[in-house]
Amino acid sequence: MAEKIGEFDLIIESGRLRKNYWNDLWRFRELFLFLAWRDILVRYKQTIIGLAWSIIRPFITMIVFTIIFGRLAKFPPPSGVPYPILVYAAMLPWQFFSTCFSDASNSLLNNSNMLTKIYFPRLIIPVSTVIVNLVDFLISFVILIGLIIWYHFVPSWNIIYLPLFLGLALLTSIGSGIYIAALNVKYRDFKYIVPFVVQFGMQISPVGYSSDMIPEKYRLLYSLNPMVGVIDGFRWCILGDQSHIYLPGLLLSIGLIVLLLFLGVWYFRKAEKTFADII
């Protein structure tokens, strides 16, 4: 059934909403940009040093990890690589993933008023949180440039592949974030579980040390953490031949990221029709 309303055709057809969902994502792109810009403005509103927090957090973490793993535990870095650069090359993707994952997981609850008032593809809300963290990533990258200059370290030409591994980190955070966001609407316990997952995830990821320290027979099992492949990829891009990619582990990580994204979108689409009723 179709009815002419102004310049638009209102079409009522069984299953049409499902078929046009992805088209609606494009039609609501301005809402996506608005939410992303709003999050950028709100994140550091009324803070004294503002965007400098994007630099302070990873910088302090890098110092702590360098002292603990580099000075006290005396974990050996690759030959010719300063330990702060080894750590910070891993801190960049991990901080990007962890903040994207945390923000996306809580995004629906933080925007509950919108969910109950108007229609739009709900997927826009958690995905839009990625933009503000992408801005943070670019700001944090300044520290890496400073470390490279300070230590007179010459990055590898592999750095041209860095956007590819950043894309993998982005897909990992979206896939896991939208899955937990959907669960968080129905089971509010997940807002307490997410910080634990982030803290535990850092401990089992090669942030303060190199993956080369993991025994060869456990490398594939270790790569079941998809961020292992991403972090190793970042180090390979920056350190070049001084850091090696475990190819079977990287392929496993990519496969898990694709699976995680598929499951996240599938479950989110399945659950979102009930968001307005139970939130």
Image (cartoon, rainbow, N blue to C red):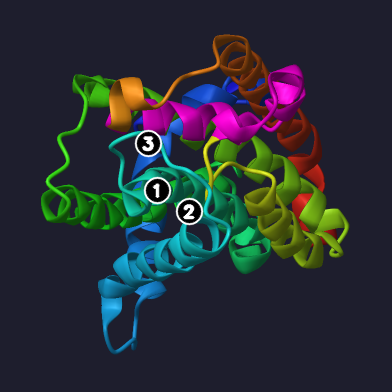
Q: Are marks 2 and 3 in contact (CB under 8 Å)?
A: no
Q: Work out whether residue 144 can be spotted.
A: yes
Q: Are marks 2 and 1 in contact (CB under 8 Å)?
A: yes
Q: Residue at x 58, y 58 (%)?
A: 73
Residue 62, horizontal then vertical, whole percent: 41, 61
Q: Which residues are magenta?
A: 211-238
Label 3 Cα crowd, 10 Å radius (few <14 / some 14-19 / many 20+): few
Residue to which mark 3 is pinned: 6
Which of 212 and 117 lies nearest the eye of the viewer? 212
Type of the residue with mark 3: Gly
Q: Which mark is residue 92?
A: 1
Residue 147, horizontal then vertical, whole percent: 21, 54
Residue 245, horizontal then vertical, whole percent: 48, 19
Residue to which mark 2 is pinned: 95
**In the image: residue 223, left or right of residue 238:** right
**In the image: residue 98, left or right of residue 274:** left
Query: What is the spatial separation of the Cα atoms under label 2 and label 3, in whole angstroms?
Result: 48 Å
| Magenta portion: prevailing SS class | helix
Q: Which mark is residue 245?
A: none
Residue 42, horizontal then vertical, whole percent: 38, 73
